[in-house]
């Protein structure tokens, strides 16, 4: 809340503050469940599926040795599995285990719950307005992909 004489924060600052609050309440790195590097690797495997170490390293902008070290811990925790190519055993791919997929779903649920808690502060009419505004913003963003500002 702003005081009577205070100037309201710009919308961009408010959106950033909201994102940070939800992030703090729901993000596994902030909660100490995984390192940032492990989170990025799990998210990449979850979004892009099975990948070789080199592909994964390039996608997340890490060295292959860093990825290999982080993957070892994720393997021990049962979140990732290494699979050898039957035609060429030197080639190793990484994939999420069922447990790894469940962990990602759980993180998504925590994010959704944190956002929902913030939305409950709004009445139904305000939630509907917010949804329309956000959709309008995203529609414009989606329509301008590939265009230069």
Image (spheres, rainbow, N blue to C red):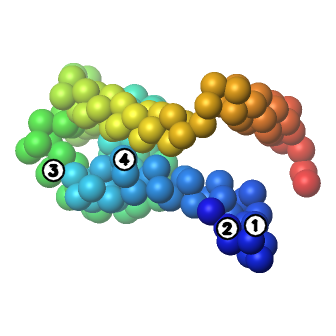
Q: Choose the circle earlier in sequence order: 1 or 2.
A: 2
Q: Residue 133 carries which label?
A: none
**Proximity of marks 1 and 3: CB atoms separated by less than 8 Å:** no
Q: Nearer the viewer, residue 77 or 102?
A: 102
Q: Nearer the viewer, residue 30 or 7?
A: 7
Residue marked by disc 2: 2
- Look at the numbered disc 4 and give the secondary structure of its residue: helix
Q: In this view, does 40 lie to the left or right of 31?
A: right
Q: Is residue 100 left or right of residue 10?
A: left
Q: Choose the circle earlier in sequence order: 4 or 3.
A: 4
Q: Residue 72 carries which label?
A: 3
Mark 4, residues whose alpha carbon is within 10 Å: few (<14), some, or many (≥20)?
Answer: many
The residue drawn where x is 32% and y is 59% is 30
**Proximity of marks 1 and 2: CB atoms separated by less than 8 Å:** yes
User: How far, Cα to Cα, is label 4 from label 2?
Assistant: 26 Å
Depth check, mark 4 against mark 2: the one in front is 2
Residue marked by disc 4: 26
User: How far, Cα to Cα, is label 3 from label 2?
Assistant: 49 Å
């Amino acid at each position: 809340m702003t005081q009577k004489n205070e100037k309201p924060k710009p919308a961009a600052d408010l959106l950033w503050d909201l994102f940070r609050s939800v992030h703090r309440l729901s993000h596994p790195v902030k909660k100490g469940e995984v390192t940032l590097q492990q989170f990025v690797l799990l998210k990449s495997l979850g979004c892009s599926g099975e990948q070789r170490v080199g592909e994964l390293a390039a996608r997340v902008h890490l060295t292959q040795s860093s990825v290999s070290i982080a993957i070892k811990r994720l393997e021990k925790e049962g979140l990732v599995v290494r699979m050898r190519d039957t035609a060429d055993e030197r080639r190793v791919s990484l994939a999420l285990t069922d447990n790894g997929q469940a962990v990602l779903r759980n993180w998504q649920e925590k994010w959704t719950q944190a956002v929902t808690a913030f939305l409950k502060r709004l009445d139904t009419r305000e939630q509907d307005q917010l949804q329309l505004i956000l959709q309008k913003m995203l529609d414009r963003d989606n329509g301008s992909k590939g265009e230069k500002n």
